[in-house]
Amino acid sequence: MSEITYSYIVEYIRALHTPPASDVLLEIEQKIANETEHWPIIKPEVADFMKVILSLIKPSNILEIGTAVGYSSLLMSEFLNENGHITTIERFPYMLNIAKTNIKKANRENTITVLEGDASDILPSLNSNTYDLIFMDCAKGQYIHFLPECIRLLKPNGLLITDNVLHKGTVARSRYLIDRRQRTTHSRLREFLWTITHSSELNSSVLPIGDGVALSFKIGGNNNE
Ligand code: SAH
Ligand code: MG
């Protein structure tokens, strides 16, 4: 099983996706659609969902964990407030090279800062209460470890969006049906989803779009802020 909902529904919703106006984004989407590249970017329906959320938030400061080729960073950069900024973390040199080329091609070098290295080393060096939005899209087994850092880094009333939380639907299956090699990821993702939905610091919702997307709102801000 590789879809988390019915294939015909996914295909139908994907057919409604409007190609992006940006040449760089369009080129990445086309390479993936033609299967000339297999970069692990957000699914078209998740891209459309992100556009709506970003239009609502109009963030000034975004943190992304997992840049890959820069697709989601470039997409989010179109919805920033004036003088807004994105910090994105990537550890894999192959991806870093492509991301930097894409960011340069799109003229977003001043808007998007790519931090090179492992998020477990970089996150502790970032300032608390800084980001309106955090997009966590890295190794799924690490989400539970990065969660306390994400909560610390988010501003009150900030939003954490986490991708691939249903892991092709496997998360909803009994662990005994899961391949042994996948069992650690399975239990860590379950622990992550249980924690965000039961935390007194967050209001969370798990959506079956793409590979599963979780939204977590950081409670505690004064509405007048
Ligand atoms: N957000 C991107 C896709 C990211 S794919 C998009 O939708 O366009 C996940 C990326 O996270 C991979 O490139 C992988 O190398 C990176 N990654 C995984 N774990 C990481 C970690 N601990 N620190 C930094 N990067 C990580
Ligand atoms: Mg993803």
Image (spheres, rainbow, N blue to C red):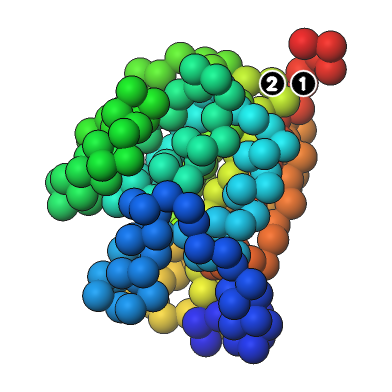
| Residue that numbered label 2 is attached to | 156
Looking at the image, which is closer to me, 113 or 117? 113
Q: Residue at x 52, y 87 (%)?
A: 1
Looking at the image, which is closer to me, 75 or 106? 106
Looking at the image, which is closer to me, 87 or 156? 87
Label 1: how many Cα within 10 Å (few below 14, some 14–19, many 20+) = few
Q: Residue 151 appears at what percent x and percent y?
A: 58, 29
Label 2: how many Cα within 10 Å (few below 14, some 14–19, many 20+) = many
Q: Amino acid at mark 2?
A: Pro
Q: Residue at x 33, y 78 (%)?
A: 34
Question: Label 1 vs label 2: CA separation?
Answer: 5 Å
- For residue 108, above or below residue 204: above
Q: Residue 214 appears at what percent x and percent y?
A: 64, 52
Using the rendered image of the protein, determine whether residue 118 is visible from the camera's viewpoint: no
Q: Horizontally, is 30 left or right of 164 in the view?
A: left
Q: Residue at x 67, y 44 (%)?
A: 53
| Residue that numbered label 1 is attached to | 220
Using the rendered image of the protein, determine whether residue 3 is visible from the camera's viewpoint: yes
Q: CB of mark 1 within 8 Å of CB of mark 2?
A: yes
- For residue 130, above or below residue 164: above
Q: Secondary structure at mark 2?
A: strand
Q: Horizontally, is 205 left or right of 113 in the view?
A: right
Q: Residue at x 31, y 34 (%)?
A: 107
Q: Secondary structure at mark 1?
A: loop
Q: Residue 78 appears at what percent x and percent y?
A: 51, 38
Of the numbered discs 1 and 2, the one sitting upstream in the chain is: 2
- State the image quarter where residue 225 is shown: top right
Disc 1 C-beta below 8 A from ligand 1: no
Looking at the image, which is closer to me, 218 or 187? 218
Q: Residue 73: which numbered mark, if any?
A: none
Q: Amino acid at mark 1?
A: Gly
Q: Residue 99 appears at what percent x and percent y?
A: 26, 45
